[in-house]
Amino acid sequence: MDLIIRSATLQGREGRHDIGIRGDRIAAIAPGLPERAAREIDAAGDLVTPALVEIHIHLDAVLTVGDPRHNRSGSLFEGIEIWGERVKSLTHEDVKRRATTALKWMLAHGVTYVRTHVDVCDPTLTALQALLEVREEVAEVITLQIVAFPQQGIYSFPDGEALMARAVEMGVDVIGGIPHYEWTREYGERDVRTALRLAAEYDRLADLHCDETDDDQSRFLELVAAETIRLGLQGRVTASHTTAMHSYNNAYAYRLIRWMRHAGVHVITNPLDNAVLQGRFDAYPIRRGFTRVKELLANGINVCIGHDSIMDPWYPLGVGDPLQACFVMVHYGHMSGRDELETMLDLVTTRAAACFGAEEYGLEEGKRADLVLFDAPTAVDAVRTLAARRAVVSRGRVVAETRPARSTVRWQGREEEVRFLI
Ligand code: FE2
C-alpha cells in the first residue's frame, strides 16, 4: 500500500475501518488491515468520506469583491451593474489567477470535483479560454467541469446563440442557460430549447440557471422537464437555483415536481447567495426565496448544494467551503430533523457526484482515492462544527492538510482542552 488511513469512521458502516490506497485507487477497506504503507494516518475515530464536490461556482467572478466598487445595497441588481463594470477589465491572467486561488481554497476544504459556470456573453470569450487552461493545469488534483453560461441571455445578447455554439466547439463540458433572465417569455423558451438541443447534439450534460427569481410566474422548469423527456436526456439535465418554486402555489408545485421526477432532473440549490439575494422586493413578511428542497428530496429528486459565489459583487463572503453552504441550508431550509441532519453532507458528496456524473467516485474498493478526513467523528458533527479537513486525498495522494484548532480553557485552577464534542 502507498497510503493507509487507520481507524476511520465511515458513513453507513459499524465500527472503525482502515482504508488502504495503492496508486490512485482504493485497494481495501476493512477493520485492521494487516498491510503496511509508506504513509499511515491515524484517523482516531474521525470521519472519512469521499471527496467533496463543488457543484455550482462562478470561477470567472470569484475574488473580485470591491473591484471596482463594493455592492452597497447587497442586491442582485447592483451586483449585475458592478459586474458589468468589472468585466471590462477582465484579462486572461486575471481570471486564471483568481480562479486558481479559489480552487486552492476549495482543495484545502476537501473539494476535488468542481463544476464552474463561465460567462460566454463576451465576443472574445476571454474567461472561457482562461478556464479551459485552468482545467488542464489542475487536472492532477481537481476534475473541473466548465459550463457555458450565457449570463445576459442566449437571445437577449447580440450573437448569443453563436457564442454558445463557439463555446461548445471550444470544449465546454456542460451547456448552460438562463431562461428567466431573457427579455421575454418567448426568448426564455428558446433559451431552454437551444440549451437542451446543444446538449443532445454534442452529447454534453446541461445545467441551466432556471427561475432564479421570486416571480411566481417564472415557470421555465416545466419546459426543462418536458424537453428533457422529449430529447431522451433523463439524468443528464440539471436546474440550478429554481428559487421561484418557493412562491408557486402548492397545486402547481405538486404537478411540476411529478414531471421533474419523470425527467430525472437534478436540482442545485445555492443557499448562501440566495439567502442574501432573494426576497429583496418584499415588505414584511419577507419570503425566503428558496427552492423546495424537502419536497424535492421526499419525491425522489436528486438535490445538491452549491456555493455559487465567493467574494464577488453578489456575495461578499465565503472561503470556498461547501460545509458553510450545508450549515446555512440546515437553517434556511428547516432541515434540522435528525434524518435530515444525518444526510445533509450527502448533498455535497454523493448527491453532487451523481449530478456531476463522476463515475470513479465513491468510498469503495476499486474507486479512485479522492477522500476527506474530517476533524469530527460523525457527519452531523462535521456540519455542526464546520470541522477542519485534517487530510484531503486526491488521486491517492495527500494534497492538503489542516491542523485543527484546539481551544484550552483555564478555570477553577485547572486547564483543559475543549473540542466541542459531547
Ligand atoms: Fe449561479
Image (cartoon, rainbow, N blue to C red):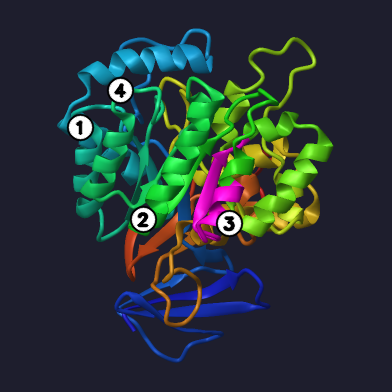
Query: Which residue type does callout 1 highlight?
Result: Thr
Label 4–label 3 contact, CB within 8 A:
no
In the picture of the structure, the residue carrying the numbered disc 4 is 158
Task: Identify the image quadrant of residue 271.
Answer: top right
Label 3–label 1 contact, CB within 8 A:
no
Taking the image as drawn, is residue 241 in sight? yes
Q: Position of residue 409 (x, y in %)?
A: 62, 40
Query: Which residue type does callout 4 highlight?
Result: Pro
Q: Residue 421 or 293: which is nearer the viewer?
A: 293
Whole-angstrom CA distance, mark 4 to mark 1, is 17 Å
Magenta residues span 225-242
Which SS class for mark 4?
loop
Mark before the other along the chain sequence, 2 or 1: 1
In the picture of the structure, the residue carrying the numbered disc 1 is 126
Indicate yes or no whether the magenta region holds residue 143.
Answer: no
Label 2–label 1 contact, CB within 8 A:
no
Q: Position of residue 51 (x, y in %)?
A: 46, 60
Taking the image as drawn, is residue 374 in sight? no
* Point 63% across, 28% down: residue: 218
Mark before the other along the chain sequence, 3 or 2: 2
Q: Nearer the viewer, mark 4 or mark 1?
A: 4
Q: Residue 77 or 314: which is nearer the viewer?
A: 77
- Local crowd size for mark 3, using a 10 Å CA cut-off: few (<14), some (14–19), many (≥20): some
Whole-angstrom CA distance, mark 3 to mark 1, is 34 Å
In the picture of the structure, the residue carrying the numbered disc 3 is 229
Which SS class for mark 2?
helix
Q: Position of residue 249 (x, y in %)?
A: 80, 32
Query: Which residue type does callout 2 highlight?
Result: Glu
